Image (cartoon, rainbow, N blue to C red):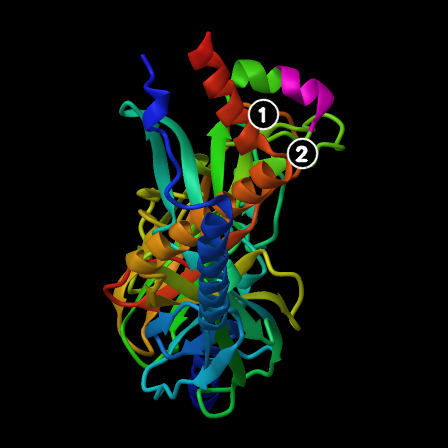
Amino acid sequence: MKKIVFSIILMFFILNSFSFVNAAVGIGMGPSRLTLEATVGESYSFDIVVFNPGDYDVKAKLNVNCKTCLSNFTLFEWKIADVNEDYQQFFRFVPDDVYIKNHTNLDSGVGITVHVTPSIWIKKDLIFTTPESINFLVRLINPGYTGKFGIPYYTLLIDDKNIKAQISASSYWSTFGAMGTVAAVGAPLDLHIVGMPMGSLIILIFIVLLIISLILVVLFKKTSLFRKLKNKIKYKRKE
Amino acid sequence: MLNVEKMKFTFSLDDVLKIYAIGVITSLSLILLMNFTIAQDQHGPYPMNMSITTAIAISLSDKLAEGIFYTNDTGAENGTNVQYPVNTQQVENATWNYVTVNRITWYNITNTGTTDEDICGKATTDLMCNPLTTGCGNTEILIANATWSNSTSNDPPYPGPYEWGTSYPGNLAADSLSKDNTIYTRYWLNVPNVPAGTYNTTFTYCAVESGVTCNC
């Protein structure tokens, strides 16, 4: 009888161990959401913590994605292209690639300093999507063509801008072996940027116009164009 | 007709030049002033103290982290839980959908953070055969052929009601999953009529604080 009871208990523990034998691969980040006020031309920094609640060490990458940066470029209500505003240039993670030991938490995780430097210039890309009939021909020359091409340009950050972004940490390597499923965590970031005031832009345009005018005046004087113009008018009158 | 007799200069050209020179000096001063104002890295960095009170974290079971491998073996039925080539035009299991001993799944995701979380998943691409592979090179299996189900108990139902996609929205594996709670998942692949070969993609599970847009 004792042997039977012992066998049952042993089987119970063996089965239980089968149920919970699998370990875990994890990633964590704090804080869970961020709000930031910034002004162009000034630099800000804050710390976040990345940790690993799993049973294996991991390597993780930090990045920032913008959620409100893709918009339509329309002409007479027809969508011509997509416009992608690149705000990633404002962010820098130090470090941006970290090794995190297992069983760490907010207190024992890896500190990351996030530098935010809003620029007066915003890089934008006008992204055109070409039809498949054209893609086929382009791929004869460029086999890697994806069916989209972008034209970069820059604009000024005027007045205020609210950006909804996401800071995320993704584990891409683990000591247990190759990862076919990646664990990632994301913290939303509401960034309010105070850009160049409209009044300053008007002054800037005025200054540029002044400089252009001065150059023209010097040019006219040096080449006696005013005199020639005056003479020409007089000559026409006499005629 | 142009009345040229009325066109007389009140100022000489030199006077005009002087006015412009003053204007330009003023303008350049303003530009320099603005340059100081808007120049990068001239001010700061201003350290911002953020108190970290909440943290987001997830743990994937190691069987899930190593990847979702599909097999023509149902796992529990012959007791192997290994990957065998799938059969075309069949619905095939993921290898650890039904663990040999007690038919539970070894695919799970646990909220190891300090707050409620939403967890969503996506595939990087459709399932793709390596272009250099003979037979299936450049062939794809649309990722929507891969389905999944979830449950808070270790018995996610078949068939999988959800299809994988290549973006997070719509692929919510857990909604407001409480701290230290686990969501269990199972995966299937509806294998279309495609050439034999190895088709790959990378899956990602993303956790965010409950209530915000799930995106990583």
The image position of residue B70, as x and y in percent, is: 54, 45
Q: Chain of mark 2?
A: B
Q: Residue at x 67, y 28 (%)?
A: B136
Front residue (pair B24, A81): B24
Front residue (pair B49, B197): B49
Classify 10 Å Cα crowding around label 2: few (below 14), some (14-19), many (20 and above): some
Q: Main secondary structure of the magenta part?
A: helix
For the residues labelled 1 and 2, say whether their Cβ atoms are less than 8 Å apart: yes
Front residue (pair A90, A42): A42
The image position of residue A219, as x and y in percent, is: 60, 39
Task: List the residue tagged with mark 2.
Answer: B197
**Label 1, label 2: how far apart the Cα atoms are:** 9 Å
Is residue B7 one of those drawn in magenta? no
The span shown in magenta is A137-143
Where residue B115 sits, quadrant-wise, is bottom left
Tell me if residue A31 can be seen.
yes
The image position of residue A190, as x and y in percent, is: 31, 66
Give the left or right position of residue B39, taking residue B147 as reference.
right
Q: Chain of mark 1?
A: B
Question: Three-letter amino acid code at disc 1?
Answer: Val
Q: How many numbered discs?
A: 2
- Give the numbered dot on residue B194: 1
Q: In this picture, is B159 found above or below B1?
A: below
Is residue A142 one of those drawn in magenta? yes
- Give the numbered dot on residue B169: none
What kind of element bears circle 2?
A: loop
Return the residue found at the far top: A239
Question: Three-letter amino acid code at disc 2?
Answer: Gly
What kind of element bears circle 1?
A: loop
